Each structure stands twice: as structure tokens, then as C-alpha cells.
Amino acid sequence: MHSRNLRPLRASASRQAEGGEDVKFQNGYGGAPDHRIAADWFARSAALGNPDAMYMLATALLAGDGVSADPVRALALLREAAEQEQLLAAQMLAYGFRDGTLGLPRDPRAAAQMVVEVEHALHHPRTVW
């Protein structure tokens, strides 16, 4: 994955349309946290193309938090979110390549490329219209 190949972020109104329900349930705003419901909302937002929701759902899938653990699906979501310049997803992939975790091969070159992409995105943040 190279910076020039990153797809532009598709602006998604999913989080606004859903009133941030995913985060409300994850953090327990207004009641006890319910990670199962949070994961469901993350999945809905991710299906609409929201890269932040993709990252959050991926972390839930890795931990089995509110959903059955599914590292293969989690990795696919992390890759898609990173393609849309979701920095935490790209950073997690960089660590995965560096350490040989997340089902990724240990690949210092790929890890270094991911770090370059994260730094590029930090200096040239995505614009959501």
C-alpha cells in the first residue's frame, strides 16, 4: 500500500445519522456499557464506509469484545480503514508488520512504509465535507 494509492475518504454521515450510538453504548453514556450493541452500531457504520467505525469494529473483533473474535475480518477492516487514512488502523498495521502479529508476516519494510503513510497523513489530514 502506497500513499499515492490511498483512496480518498468517502464522507459518511453515518455517525451523525446514528447520533453516535456506537460510542454511547461502548462507553456507557446514559447507562451501563453494552459492547454487543456498540459492535452492532460499529458494523452498521462500517458497512456505510466509515473508516473510524471500521477501526473500532476491528478492535472489537480482535478482542472478541461484544462479538465473536474474528481476526481475519478484523485484519480486512484494518486494511480498508487504513486505505481511507484512518491513522490508528494504519498504526496498528505498522505494529502488526513490525512484530509479526495480527496474522501478518514480520516485515520491517512494510512496517516502515506504514509509518511513512501515517506521518504523511498527519501532515496532510483528510478532509471530510
Image: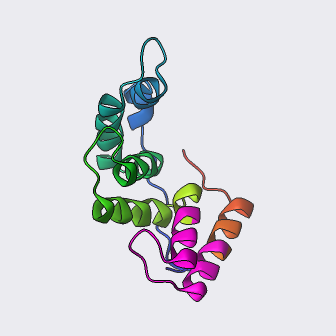
**Magenta-highlighted stretch: main secondary structure?**
helix
Q: Position of residue 47 (x, y in %)?
A: 29, 48
In which quadrant will I find the C terminus?
top right
- Residue 59 seen anywhere in this rendered image of the structure: yes
Q: How many numbered markers are drawn?
A: 0
Q: Position of residue 121 (x, y in %)?
A: 65, 63
Q: Is residue 107 left or right of residue 123?
A: left
Magenta residue span:
91-115
- Snapshot quadrant of residue 16: top left
Q: Position of residue 110 (x, y in %)?
A: 55, 83
Q: Measured along the vertical axis of the image, is residue 104 above or below residue 87?
A: below
Q: Position of residue 34 (x, y in %)?
A: 36, 25
Q: Residue at x 32, y 61 (%)?
A: 71
Is 114 in the magenta?
Answer: yes
Q: Residue at x 65, y 73 (%)?
A: 115
The foreground one among 14 and 117 is 117
Q: Measured along the vertical axis of the image, is residue 50 above or below residue 32?
A: below
Is 109 in the magenta?
Answer: yes
Q: Is residue 61 left or right of residue 84?
A: left
Q: Residue at x 66, y 56 (%)?
A: 125
Q: Measured along the vertical axis of the image, is residue 21 above or below residue 93?
A: above
- Snapshot quadrant of residue 14: top left
Q: Residue at x 27, y 42 (%)?
A: 67
Please identify the residue farthest to the left as the structure is shown: 68
The type of colouring in the image is: rainbow
- Residue 3 seen anywhere in this rendered image of the structure: no
